[in-house]
Image (spheres, helix red, strand yellow):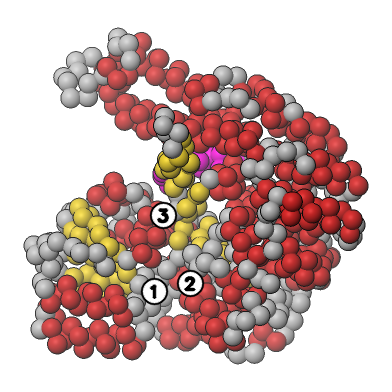
Amino acid sequence: MSDSDENSLRDRQIALINKMLMFNQDTSTSDLTSGSDFQEVVWKALVLDAKGTAIVSSILRVNDLLKAGVTVHSLIQQKRSPLPDVPVVYFVQPTQENIDAIVQDLIEEKYAEFYINFTSVLNRELLENFAKQVSSSGKTDRIKQVFDQYAEFVVTEPDLFSLELPLVFRQLNDPNSTENAINSLCETIANGLYDAIMTVNSIPIIRAPKGGSAEIVARILEGKLRDYVINTRANSASVSHSLERFVLVILDRNIDLASMFAHSWIYQSLVFDVFKLARNTITIPTETKEGQEKEKKMDLDPKDFFWSANAHLPFPDAVENVEAALAAYKAEAEEITRKSGVSELSDLDPSAGNDTLNIQEAVNKLPELTSRKSVIDTHMSVLASLLSQLESRGLDAFFEIEQGQDSPKSRQRFMETLKDGKTNNLEDKLRTFILLYLTSTTDLPQSFIKEVEDYFKGQDYDIRALSYIYKSKGLMKMSALSLQNKSLESNGTGKNKASGTNSSVLLSGLSNKLYGLTEGKIQGGVGSLISGIKNFLPEKKTIPVTNVVEAVMDPLNSSQKNLETTDDYLYFDPKMVRGSHSKKPKRQSYTKSIVFVVGGGNYLEYQNLQEWAHSQQANTKSVIYGSTAIVTPANFVDEMASLQ
């Protein structure tokens, strides 16, 4: 986050991995996804473990690896054929098991040269063990490099990362968890955050609330960063020492449980909620002609133009925009075929001798057009599948209910949806009830709670999650609900602002206008059907995590209520003398931050933070969002159920 480099976190990690694949030599190109463009490519093998695979597969595809000279990639624990004339690059976690496997490869002379990269820091004990084993093998000359890469986090969006640590919320809140287990987990979390900070290349100010896991992580991380600053102070080429510091805000998941269950109308959030979205691969369940269910996988390339432009938009906008993208493609394709005299783009033969300028131009444009059509087809398929799920599960009704304020009328609307006869959306019904319970400013009537519980019991549906939810309400009142939401609209009277009633009426008609569309006819005038409705979506508002970040980053424009909450947060500066955090910090503005949630995160918070950051027209903010894991609402319900 230095002034001289405004690349996203994903760009930085792509550059790091490409540099590693080029034997850790600088790859200074304008396109970070093709770092080998100006260097002689050396063909090599790439050996990964599960963590290395997760990191690389999220940001690079097979073609990207090929550009960097990787012809074979395989898992370290699988049986691998020897390639004695080929150099190998390892990218694995620093574990005894991986070290033993590398040494065995060395003894067997499986590769010509060994370039070893660990995803994170190799501790002294393992380093000494590794050195001893290599020395005993008599093959020391084959080891060309050993690097710590500080890369043990997974990036799936330009400024979103995950440590992919499962069930952290459960482990931290389980009364049976020992103090040692919790401290060990917090140490692992701090190590992952340390790697992200090394990649960002700047030492942050750290802010965290008192008395929870966020404080433990903050204290451990501050110690690691302080040691780093002391050990590298004499090295001017170390982490950037620019005058502008960024702020790292570490939060506990308990600050806002409600957003983990919410139904969102944002395209990316819907895909994550309804389908499986992991490491930029969407998995959609489909039916074969024989009626059997199978999974269809679709890759989201970092260069996917439609995803980049629409992931953060409301679902109706994405539907409208895919129609526009298809229309633009068709117009361009028709123009090219008209000029070149062929009836279809597929009739163009790139290998043929092309005499006319028109045909040469058409052939030159063919790869870009083919790639664009492939992206459009992918998103048309995803959107059509989403429409089918919206209809089947009635998801718009849950979104609608969750947007309104708690009232007898909204509770009645929920009961009507609860008892609508559908049983394929019991999880959605439970999530909406949880959200109503957590966000209600007063206690819900016991008669209403009992009626809801009786309904789920009648369906023989697991509602153990409610036990923890009921206990957590008091804790939330002391944290998230004390924060004050604000509008993200450009002005208070904009056309996007709608009252809860009007929004509800208009949204209730959305399903009738969109349902029934199939992949083949999604472009048949959908944009005109929804253009009026999308203007009446509920007013965009900040959510608790965003409120905290605004109070820390932009105190002049934050509410007094939110400032009072964050003024009590701990303050750590790894560059200052120890004990500086005990003093109450001065309120100051920051333009850049990392926001990290311990215990699970979600795309709703990521998108809300980005929306807030880009709404600051006079002084745009840069916010990176991370968590121990990006957790689906369904998985978070399961975590709640395990906390009795």
Give the amino acid type for the residue marked by disc 2 in the picture.
Answer: Gly
Q: Are marks 1 and 2 in contact (CB under 8 Å)?
A: yes
Dot 3 falls on a residue whose secondary structure is: helix
Question: At 62% across and 55% down in the image, what residue appears?
Answer: 633
Question: At 72% across and 85% down in the image, what residue appears?
Answer: 583
Q: Position of residue 608 (x, y in %)?
A: 66, 52
In the image, is residue 633 above or below residue 302? below
Q: Mark 1 highlights which residue?
A: 120
User: In this view of the protein, can residue 595 be seen by the observer?
Assistant: no
Give the amino acid type for the residue marked by disc 3 in the picture.
Answer: Ser
Query: In terms of image quadrants, where is residue 76?
Result: bottom left
In the image, is residue 388 above or below residue 11? above
Observer-nearest of 258 and 338: 258
Question: At 85% across and 47% down in the image, what residue appears?
Answer: 411
Give the amino acid type for the residue marked by disc 1 in the picture.
Answer: Ser
Q: Mark 2 highlights which residue?
A: 192
* Label disc, if present, on residue 58 of the rendered structure: 3
Q: Position of residue 368 (x, y in %)?
A: 35, 31
Question: At 78% across and 66% down in the image, what residue appears?
Answer: 470
Label 1 neighbour load within 10 Å: few <14, some 14-19, many 20+: many
Q: Which residues are magenta?
A: 299-313
* Label disc, if present, on residue 304 of the rendered structure: none
Of the 4 image quadrants, the one containing the C terminus is bottom right
Q: Are marks 2 and 3 in contact (CB under 8 Å)?
A: no
Report the Cα–Cα distance between label 1 and label 2: 8 Å
Query: In terms of image quadrants, where is residue 569?
Result: bottom right
Q: Position of residue 63 (x, y in %)?
A: 28, 46
